[in-house]
Image: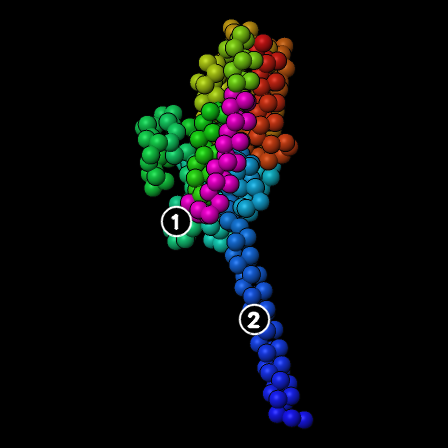
Amino acid sequence: MNNQVKLSIIAIIVLIPLASFSVWATDSGLQTNQKDNSKKINAIASFYPLYDFAKQVGQDKVDVQLLVPTGVEPHDWEPTIQDVQQMQKSNLIIINGIGFENWVHSLKELNYSGTIVDTSVGIIIRDSEIIDEHETDEHDHESGDPHIWLNPVLAKIQVQNIADSFSQQDPQNQQFYQTNAKSYIKKLDNLDNKIRKELSTCNRDFIAFHDAFSYFADEYELHQHTIISSNDPHAEPTAKTLENVINTARELQIQIIFTEESVDTRVSNVIANEISGKILVLSPIETGIDGNYISRMTQNLDNLKEALC
């Protein structure tokens, strides 16, 4: 074998492994980049409406988990050690704010390293100071009525706050999140217009189970009366309270008394029986049972129309 042939064989032996290494390295780099580019935001939504909003905005780029389990009332829910561990691993925790999540302070004390997204920022809270729309989530406004999500107009602000938080966390996909938010806000606009139109010529007074529909009533010029006067649906009405509600129903000629999915219906039934009426559900949509936010708000509208129109 001459020297030229030997040199050619040596060159082949050296070049093949180098070429293979180059291809492997290139593929490996592509895989790494693809993995980095496809990494999802890990977000936790405190309760069902925010979970639905976050899913609509984040879609396949955000892994959204629901913190309060399906069917569980979030007012008095407290996280377990496992829940806290799950939250510590997340990039974002999406809350309603206004004191609705009373466990948030404990999380801050545990030095949570992610971002707590207060979706109530920019909303004027009933029975509290006016909140400037440019204030950050560092502002604590924890008193007042928390049921902002039941007003579709205010829900739009919550959706936008979620989209902005996703955009800050993942600037590369900002347009994706903002476009999704714009699309969903348009659906909320349609819902708002439908409620406004279909209740415009109806009676104005209704009896809800607990004080959850104040923002809704204000928006659509309705008058909410309640069996439970507090924001807590598990409070117990007194005999005097029941008597007053019955008298109010008779005075206003109300024939339908509203209850909720997660409460004992016997109280509403007692009132309905006294006025020879019936009960329907007016859902605070606090638990993820059936449907989604818009479908359940539409069901609320249908039941309100039966009661008022």
Residue 214 found in image quarter: top left
Secondary element at tag 1:
helix
> How far across and how far down the image is residue 215, in percent?
45, 22
Q: Which residues are magenta?
A: 168-192
Magenta includes 216? no
What's the residue at 59%, 35% (across, down)?
Answer: 288
Residue 189 included in the magenta stretch of the image? yes
| Residue 111 as seen in the image, left or right of residue 264 | left
Residue 131 falls left or right of residue 229: left
Q: Closer to the camera, 33 or 71?
A: 33
Per the image, the residue denoted by label 1 is 108
Residue found at x 38% / y 25%: 126
Distance Cα–Cα, label 1 vs label 2: 48 Å
Q: In the rendered view, tell whether residue 260 sits above or below residue 17.
A: above
- Read off the residue under disc 2: 22
Mark 2 crowd level (few <14, some 14–19, many ≥20, 10 Å Cα): few
The amino acid type found where label 2 is placed reads Ser
| SS for dot 2 | helix
Q: Is residue 55 above or below residue 263?
A: below
Q: Residue at x 36, y 25 (%)?
A: 127
Q: Residue at x 62, y 81 (%)?
A: 12
Look at the image and tell me in which quarter the C terminus lies. top right
Amino acid type, residue under disc 1 in the picture: Lys
| 143, 171: nearer the viewer | 171
